[in-house]
Structures are given as C-alpha cells and as structure tokens.
Amino acid sequence: DIFMPEISLATGSARHTIVVRLYANAIAESLEATELQLARTIYELLEDFAADFDFSDSNVRNMLPTEITIRPGYQSIGDPNRMFRIVDMAIPFMVNDVVTFS
C-alpha cells in the first residue's frame, strides 16, 4: 500500500505500509500459551518499530503509530486439518522525497 499524501513544489513524500504476519500452530500447544506468545511478539515488534527504526535509509521519516492495525485470525495452510493462529500487523510509515518533480 503506497500513496502520496504530501507534495511540495519539488518533491513528494509517500505513505508506505508493510504487513508483518505471525504464525503459530493452533493445536501444538495450549491456546493460552499460543495467545500469550503472539501478544508478546507483537508488543516487542511494536517497540522495535517505534524506536529508532529507519530501514537504514535517511528518507524514512517516521512510523504512523495511530494508524497501525493488528488483525488476529485462524488460517489453514497446506493440509486443511492443520490450523494456524495468525496475526497480521500493518505498519504505515512516511518516506520523504520518493519523487522529484522537474
């Protein structure tokens, strides 16, 4: 998901969204243990992204914390009888100067 919400006379900044998907076997452990591990991982990732995270690119301006979405669910992958607990975390961020107008 990429779009340009900010444009100046010379450049445009874009809003990018990356999606991080976590998987856990829904039947291998207790449901409570799976839920706790996924929640811990989500919070650790949020902390990492909110810190000094810049994709090693000086044009990455900031993460948009009020627009982060986290969607849990279940999905069978491969064998229809093998269920996974999934969590999708969409993380939007701004990137400066993705386009230069001449």
Image: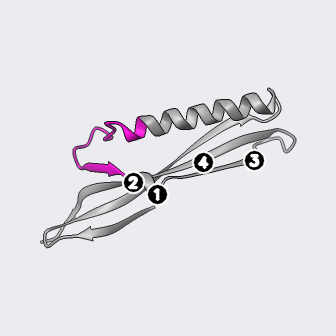
The earlier-in-sequence mark between 4 and 1 is 1
Position above or below: 27 against 8: above
CA distance separating discs 4 and 3: 12 Å
Which of labels 4 and 1 is toward the front? Answer: 1
Disc 4: which residue: 88
User: Relative to residue 42, is residue 38 drawn left or right?
Assistant: right
Q: Point out the frontmost of discs 4 and 2.
A: 2
Q: Counting other residues with Cα less than 10 Å from the Cα at mark 2, is it few (<14), some (14-19), or many (20 or more)? A: some
For marks 4 and 3 on the same chain, the one whose residue lies earlier in the sequence: 3
Q: Which residue is mark 3?
A: 75
Please give the residue where the numbered disc 2 appears in the rendered image.
64
Do residues under tags 1 and 2 come within 8 Å of each other at their CB atoms?
yes
Q: Quadrant of the C terminus?
A: bottom left
Judging depth in this view, the residue of 84 and 99 nearest the camera is 84
How far is mark 4 from mark 2, CA to CA?
A: 16 Å
Residue 55 counted in the magenta span: yes
Q: Amino acid at mark 1?
A: Glu
Q: Which residues are magenta?
A: 48-64
Marks 4 and 2 in Cβ contact (< 8 Å) = no
Q: Earlier in the sequence, mark 2 or mark 3?
A: 2
The residue lying toward the viewer, choosing from 100 and 30, is 30
